Image (cartoon, helix red, strand yellow):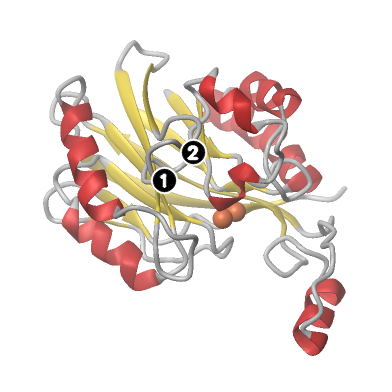
Amino acid sequence: MRILFTADIFAQAGRRMASVHIPALLRERDVDFVIANGENAAGGFGLTDNLVGKLRSYGVDVITSGNHIWDRKEFVPQLDRDDRVLRPFNYPPGAPGQGSTIAESRSGHKVAVLSLQGRTSMPSTDCPFRLGKAEVERLRQQTPIVFIDFHAEATAEKVALGWYLDGFASAIIGTHTHVQTADERILPQGTAYLTDAGMTGPHDSVIGVQPEQAIRRFLTQVPTRFKPAEEGARFCGVLVDIDTDSGKATHIERLQIAETTT
Ligand SMILES: [Fe+2]
Ligand SMILES: [Fe+2]
């Protein structure tokens, strides 16, 4: 089976690219299941009910997230009501929502999705390594197909989790930096790995934000309210082929599609 993972969908430009390319990839690339990171879908900060509905209408089966999932306070209670929108699993007990789910693919296979968050230069959470491994083992009792979105800043932490869970998870795809890396591979025990899938959003930006605003912040160190950029839209993501009997990945393809202007 083939899973499409869509990197952080950032504001309007990201939603526009998702609305075009997710349906196209479903049609043209035989995609069986769609996961998208939605933490920046609402103007760069968090999610809304309305946008969850829109992402579903494009074909997204499960939405993963990260540190920005808490930005829209009015949306947070929805995390307890919708088990197809995940916050990182390793937030401490008592945090709203859930960090993993199992959903059925278009061809009838059970797909487990697990959202984890790193701890290096990130909000303080419980250990993604120990909790992540225990949760993968629990999910594997129900299906061999386990897909992890590892939302983390530090390359070394992401690479280390890849090796730690090689052979346990079908795929470990990094998010959060909004800059795609070119290190996609299948690890020796059959886990598809990519340090960062990038950003589905405006690339004439500083990780989504208008460049002049981000530069002013660096020059003055004065916090300002960032506005999303609009230019240079790209769709970023990855296609992973998985053997449905073993749960091992057989192929990984990195995607980066620039908007064509006519
Ligand atoms: Fe993000
Ligand atoms: Fe993030």
Q: Nearer the viewer, residue 49 or 34?
A: 49
Q: Secondary structure at mark 1?
A: loop
Of badges 2 and 1, the one in the foreground is: 1
Residue highlighted by disc 1: 91
Q: x, y (%) of residue 35?
A: 48, 33
* Residue 100 in view (yes/no): yes
Residue highlighted by disc 2: 87
Ligand 1 rendered quadrant: bottom right
In which quarter of the view is residue 109 placed?
top left
Q: x, y (%) of residue 17?
A: 71, 41
Q: CA distance from mark 2 to mark 1?
A: 8 Å
Q: x, y (%) of residue 50?
A: 75, 24
- In the figure, 30 relative to 4: above or below? above
Q: Residue at x 53, y 28 (%)?
A: 85
Left or right of 219 on screen, residue 115: left
In which quarter of the view is residue 36 placed?
top right
Q: x, y (%) of residue 166?
A: 17, 51
Indicate which disc residue 16 carries. Answer: none
Residues tagged 2 and 1 counted as in contact (Cβ below 8 A) = yes
| Amino acid type, label 2 | Arg
Q: Residues within 10 Å of mark 2 (few under 14, many from 20)?
A: many
Q: Secondary structure at mark 2?
A: loop
Report whether the residue tagged 2 is closer than 8 Å to ligand 2. Answer: no
* Residue 29 in view (yes/no): no
| Amino acid type, label 1 | Tyr
Q: Residue at x 60, y 32 (%)?
A: 22
Left or right of 230 on screen, residue 6: left
Q: Residues within 10 Å of mark 1 (few under 14, many from 20)?
A: many
Q: Residue at x 70, y 49 (%)?
A: 10
Q: Residue at x 14, y 23 (%)?
A: 141
